[in-house]
Image (spheres, helix red, strand yellow):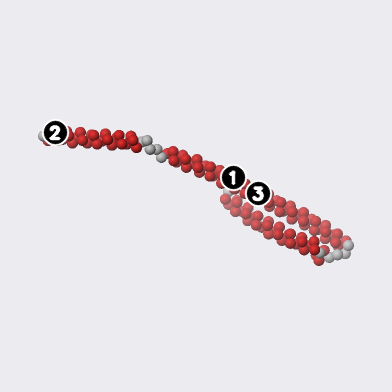
Amino acid sequence: MKKIYTQLEKAKQEFAEEVARVKKVELADYDFKRYMQDYDKSFTKFRSAYKNGINTAKSATDKHFEEVFDILDKAEKEMDTFGNKAKEIGIDFRDTKQYKEFQDLKKILLSRKSDISEKQKEISKLM
């Protein structure tokens, strides 16, 4: 009787092991590697878009800085010409409306150059 009981227990254990193997085979259908691949693709897209955005911002900022610098340079040259012309005819150009307009413009442009320089530094840190 003991022998039969032992054989029965052994068969029961083998059956349980076989059921466990079948369940493992069923679980093998679940593969989470594809989610990692999906994440990798998503991150690659994000990184590219982010980098493109930063490059676009850098280009726009650099271009704006050049334009502000050119405007200031042209305005200063014209003010020099204006000042020389005013001296020729005996007028103190610093009391003119044009000089005040120039000073207002220069203040705005110098402030903008400073702001743009700060933006360029921020963008450089992001790159």
Q: CA distance from mark 2 to mark 1?
A: 75 Å
Residue 72 percent location from the top left of the image? 74, 55
Q: CA distance from mark 1 to mark 3?
A: 12 Å
> Pointers 2 and 3 in contact (CB under 8 A)?
no
Tell me which amino acid carries mark 1: Asn
The residue under the point 80% across, 61% down is: 98
Q: Nearer the viewer, residue 81 or 31?
A: 31
Which sits earlier in the primary sequence, circle 1 or circle 3? 1
The residue under the point 77% across, 57% down is: 76
Q: Which corner quadrant holds the N terminus?
A: top left
Side of 124 where 107 appears, left or right: right
Tell me which amino acid carries mark 2: Ile
Residue 52 is marked as 1
Which residue lies under the disc numbered 3?
Answer: 60
Which residue lies under the disc numbered 2?
Answer: 4
Which sits earlier in the primary sequence, circle 2 or circle 1? 2
Residue 121 percent location from the top left of the image? 61, 53
Q: Residues within 10 Å of mark 2 (few under 14, many from 20)?
A: few
The residue under the point 71% across, 61% down is: 107
Task: From this view, report whether residue 83 is shown above or below residue 21.
Answer: below
Q: Nearer the viewer, residue 121 or 47?
A: 47
